[in-house]
Image: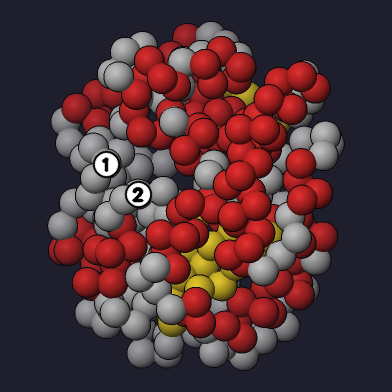
Amino acid sequence: MRKVNLFVIGAPKSGTTAICDYLSGHPKLCFSEPKEPKYFHTDFSNRHRYALNESDYQKCFKNLSEEHTVIAEGTVWYLYSAVAVKNILAYNPCAKFVVMLRDPVDLAYSLHSQLYYGGDEDEKDFAKAWRLQEQRGQGKNIPFKCRDAKSLQYGEIAKLGSQIRELLSVVDAKRVKFIVYDEFCNDPQSIYRELLEFVDLEYDDRVEFPRINENRSRRSGPLPLLMDMGKLAKNRLGIRRSLGLWRLLHPVLSHKEERPLLPERFRVELQEYFADDLNLLSTLVGKDLSAWNQCKVIEE
């Protein structure tokens, strides 16, 4: 099989699901199924990964045909992983990368909500989960259903500056496309056209850019618990392919929910935590991102 040549590597909760969905509709681009093959971040637990060998990885591109000039996947944990980008370069030295950037406070808050929804996190209160990071880094208070404790280190995951610095130390900047979440939300069509130009594809006249992956909250009751038990059993049996039940039943299992604003004092604490890394990020990508250090409403 021809090599995958485009990787949307992160960051989580920064619009990657939407941009991957839009790209998957282009007639000259073959996108992986599932969107996240989770193959190259070999420093994560096998419970967290999907494809564990190249044969399984290739099966994620069964729709590949001669008409496709770009082959892509979108595993958001690759940017955070200490080894994924190097593994990708060993696989395809000419690969291009897309990195989506978001206010680190919003990113961390949104990621916590997703992990709680999916069962990897069991502490519903974000502030309490934030203060558990040190203990969890020592292997304590790890949720029973968590597939890899590294996914609960919200502070490190949202430090995009240090991750971009590592990325650019091994990849030519010309092969990296940075997309700012706010700009993408405000004008997805323009960003989509820029991205197609980055991968040498002609614009396909797409004009519809629906919102994807809105925040959801789990409903209480026996059915979600039963689904959790089934997911846990599936993981223990080594079955990694999704059976599609959660996607089919999610209107019954969950509901859309707006996250409340973070308390101002806590948001300021987080902004101070990320301040140096945010300055580094601004320098590396050549954009003034200081507006992210202002209190604002969570939109996703």
Residue 168 visible to the viewer: yes
Q: How is the image coloured?
A: secondary structure
Q: 298 or 241, which lies in front?
A: 298
Q: Which residue is drawn at 24% across and 31% down?
A: 235
Q: Which residue is drawn at 58% across and 65% down?
A: 284
| Residue 123 relative to residue 32: left or right | right
Q: Kindly state the secondary structure of the residue where label 1 is placed.
A: loop
User: In x, y percent, where is residue 297?
Assistant: 83, 35
| Residue 10 relative to residue 110: left or right | left
Q: Which label number is shown at residue 105?
A: none
Q: Kindly state the secondary structure of the residue where label 2 is placed.
A: loop
- What's the residue type where badge 2 is placed? Ser
Q: 76 or 171, which lies in front?
A: 171
Residue 181 in the image: above or below residue 201: above
Which quadrant does the C terminus fall into?
top right
Residue 113 occupies quadrant: top right
Q: Residue at x 24, y 45 (%)?
A: 43
Earlier residue among tags 1 and 2:
1
Residue 99 occupies quadrant: bottom right
User: In x, y percent, where is residue 180?
Assistant: 68, 60
User: In x, y percent, where is residue 37?
Assistant: 34, 55
- Mark 1 — residue? 44
- What's the residue type where badge 1 is placed? Phe
- Mark 2 — residue? 81
User: Which of label 1 and label 2 is nearer to you?
Assistant: 2
- Mark 1 and mark 2 in contact? Answer it, CB < 8 Å: yes
Q: Which residue is drawn at 82% across and 60% down?
A: 186
